Amino acid sequence: MSNTQKIKFITNRLKKVDSNFLEIVHAMFQKEAELNEDEIIGYDVEGNPLTTKVAENLFEKGVQEVKNSGGYTIEELKKAAKSW
């Protein structure tokens, strides 16, 4: 049975189940979503996984650095680029 057929079968069966069984299935899907919340979105140069939570923290740090004048102006970059 293909995945498409399985999905169709499950969808049709869910339309016919009682509320107790539906609560069980709902709890299973919620738990699965929680477990996969911090999924791998990439890898660093050493092959270590980069998860969504780690990436979010890194991006937030970068935004804070820029907000706290941790960045460079265009003029500073142009001046630095001349010596490259």
Image (cartoon, rainbow, N blue to C red):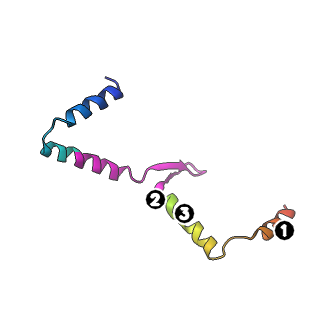
- Residue displayed at 56% across by 68% down: 61
Residues 50 and 75: in front is: 75
- Identify the amino acid type marked 3: Leu
Above-or-below relation of 15 to 62:
above
- Dot 2: element: helix
The residues colored magenta run: 26-53
Q: Which residue is mark 3?
A: 58
**Can residue 83 be seen from the camera position used here?**
no
Q: Which mark is residue 66?
A: none
The answer to if 40 sits in the magenta stretch is yes
Q: Which residue is mark 2?
A: 53
**Mark with earlier residue (3, 1):** 3
**Can residue 6 be seen from the camera position used here?**
yes
Query: Does residue 17 appear to the left or right of 83 in the view shown?
Result: left
Considering the image in quadrants, where does the N terminus appear?
Answer: top left
Q: Which residue is mark 1?
A: 79
**Mark 3 → mark 1, Cα distance in angstroms:** 28 Å
**Mark with earlier residue (2, 1):** 2
